Image (spheres, helix red, strand yellow):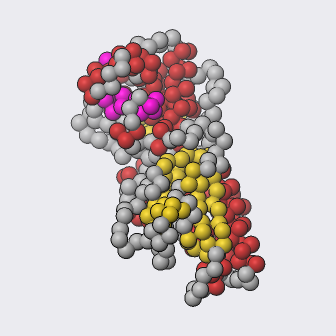
Amino acid sequence: MPVNWRIEVEWEALQSAPAEEQACFGAIGISVNNLWLTEGHDYLANRLRAKPYLSGYHLAEWFAWNWWRLRWEPRALSREWGQTHCMSSIGQGYIWPNITIFSDGERTTLVSAPTAERAEIPFRYISGYAAVLPAGQFEAGLDEFFSQILHRLEAQGVSGTNFHSIFESLEEERSSPQLSTRRKFEALLGEDPDEADPIILTQLLADAEEASADSIQEVAATRAQTGATPALKDLIALAQMKGFDASSRDAVRLRDHAGLTPSESVPAWLLGARAARALRDQERLNGHPISDIELAALAGTTPNALVPAQDRLADFSFMVDSQKETSRLILRSKWHEGRRFELARLLGDRLLAPRSNRLFPATRAYTYRQKMQRAFAAELLSPFDEVETILQGDYSSEGQRDAAEHFDVSPLMIRTLLVNHHRIPSEELSDDFDAVSTVA
């Protein structure tokens, strides 16, 4: 389904405000596929209104300043993250919609939620909707809105504003490959432009030259969960001292990659599931559970890697190529089921990641690559068709545990599969909006 999102403005008069605010005041609505995320109850007029009265200038200023983080920073739980990604934080005396925006790198999610009814607040938003759209469409919609605001300011004789300054900087950054890379890393770290620790940023940029930007960007995105950004040399050293041997020469390879290229038009979970089904078909695994010996052989390592560990060695699992066709891997989980899941994720990452990668991280971040890994591992270890056969319509907790024991996976993995395939409500698992969105 083609996604059609836009910010619509109907200009209105405003008194006693700065010139730029007067120029860009109006009824402003945000819609996706003709569904209004800004719809609410106007108590003063006693009517529903799709476009509340807001400041287009302040909205454009907020979008331009936060552009890099809205475009690249995945979902996180910190308060500071919410202030950057939720429109209700804009302030300036307006009643802003409770719309949260975030990205996995390929696709952008907009989530609207109703606001509380309060006697002193004349407008209450009522929309509760989650929409996922290709990130390119999100960019195009913002560009159209920025253009509208710039033309309005020019028509009203307003120039030299803070928005003009921010927008000019943004245009320069987006047109420069070097600046774009720097801003993307900052966003993945959860930092505003020029606010990241210069030592960490320099380290990441240098590591990207050595191990590919794709993989090091995944490391940067882990900071929201771990608070750390390990250097490539430290990951290599840890793998050499504590890791397990893995051979890309012995690991399985997909003979056919048709339809398995990451794309903003394909949800990450769907791509990962496709790849897992392709591998199962290729290796004639049918719907049977995969043993530790089989899983280790597919990944080119030893079953010893799946033995439960006493200590957690790292904040995330990873595989790193040290020499041609020679690798070492570290698994984060201490538990057997968790280690199986992580090894399956690393297997999927090697199969689907760009060939230039020599580092394959499996983290807790909500980037497209990580979501793709999780879906691959879930479908590989517990193929959905077989899960359905076992459950026979019984999606209770007990049924999920039975399926989990059969495939030697965690009950959470079974729940994830059931949500992704719309067998249980998404409210039971709020892990991945992309999997349950009404817009795909």
Q: Position of residue 355 (x, y in %)?
A: 62, 35
In terms of depth relative to the viewer, which is nearer, 60 or 409? 60
Q: Position of residue 97 (x, y in %)?
A: 48, 63
In terms of depth relative to the viewer, which is nearer, 185 or 259? 259
Which residue sits at x=60%, y=68%?
27
Which residue sits at x=63%, y=52%?
5
Q: Position of residue 178 (x, y in %)?
A: 66, 60
Q: Does the magenta stretch include residue 425?
A: no
**Residue 251 in the image: above or below residue 34:** above
Q: Disc count in the image?
A: 0
Range shown magenta: 406-422
Which quadrant is home to the C terminus? Answer: top right
Q: Does the magenta stretch include residue 407?
A: yes
Q: Is the magenta stretch mostly helix, strand or loop?
A: helix
Q: Position of residue 9 (x, y in %)?
A: 65, 66
Residue 254 makes an appearance in the image: yes
